[in-house]
Amino acid sequence: MSAVAELLKILDLEQLDVNLFRGRSPQTGWQRVFGGQVVGQALVAATRTVEGRSPHSLHGYFMLPGDPSTPIIYEVECIRDGRSFVTRRVVATQHGQAIFSMSASFQTEEEGFSHQIDMPDIPRPTELPSEEAFKNRLPADMPQAIRNYLERERPIELRPVDLSRYVDSRPRPPMQSVWIRATERLPDDPAAHQSVLAYASDMTLLDTALVAHGSSVFSADIQGASLDHALWLHRPFRADDWLLYTQDSPFAGGGRGFSRGRIYTEAGELVASVAQEGLIRRRRK
């Protein structure tokens, strides 16, 4: 099974009862569940209780690390069904404890004022080396954790605009940009693209807070974990087309790093915005 087929299978939750769903995790040997997977599955659970409206925002909190060996139960609470907006609350549990909670809002489509911040002028994905080409040029001194991550088959292809920070520990301005897309064609259902983008929106974002400190989440001395995650969906898009994920980190302190992201189509349309705070601290010896 391809990585994309596996992702779609993971996002296709099993319905146990009214407003009650079960999701599983890929058995990849990771010690905890990837945060983007929980966000994506929770969005799928909420979406399946709503008709005629599309999600426009979600706000979630990570409370406990997920156990990949155990299914995750998602319980959806129907908070309100209004004429224009619908609100849902989702709680994900394992071993009798909540590991994640999320509120999501859905809206009927309507016209209104429109503006956006322009996409930054950076190299296009076709001007950057493909993942396969990059794998063949990995520096010999690249940290093994980064090498393992880049060489693994993944459902989302990443083309960072600048990869030098992973082999150069100099502090830099806390910002980065990366092109992302699903590695295979996805179904035409907009809900599939929304859940895949929710999954991908947790990738690389926390790492942006460490750019200013010449480090990364792959560093052996860094303990990192997502604490909360917010996603706003502005326009329709396809997650199997190239999307620019441009990120910055306005603040870090108190063992936490705050990062923001904007997601554009290759044509320059802003389709989503993201914000996240995460734990970033040096491991105790």
Image: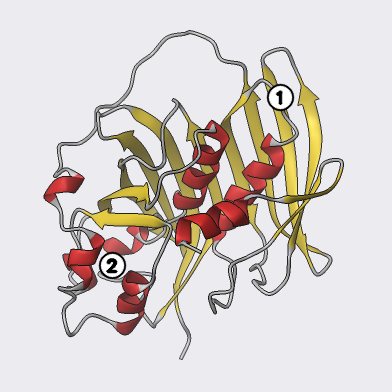
Q: Give x and y (percent) for residue 53.
A: 64, 22
- Residue 1 in sight from this viewpoint: yes
Residue sitting farthest toward the right:
17
Residue type at mark 1: give it: Glu
User: Can you identify the residue that label 1 sits on?
Assistant: 51
Q: Secondary structure at mark 1?
A: loop
38 left or right of 143 in image? right
Q: Position of residue 225 (x, y in %)?
A: 51, 66
Which of the labelled discs sits on residue 242, or is there none? none
Q: Residue furthest front?
A: 1
Label drawn at residue 213: 2
Q: Residue at x 72, y 12 (%)?
A: 83
Which is more foreground, mark 2 or mark 1? 1
Q: CA distance from mark 2 to mark 1?
A: 46 Å
Picture coordinates of residue 77 (x, y %)? 81, 39
Q: Quadrant of residue 27?
A: bottom right
Q: Is residue 36 visible?
A: no
Q: Secondary structure at mark 2?
A: loop
Dot 2: few (<14), some (14–19), or many (≥20) neighbours within 10 Å? Answer: some
Seen in the image, is 8 located left or right of residue 166? right
User: Residue at coordinates 41% horizontally, 44% vertically from top-left?
Assistant: 185
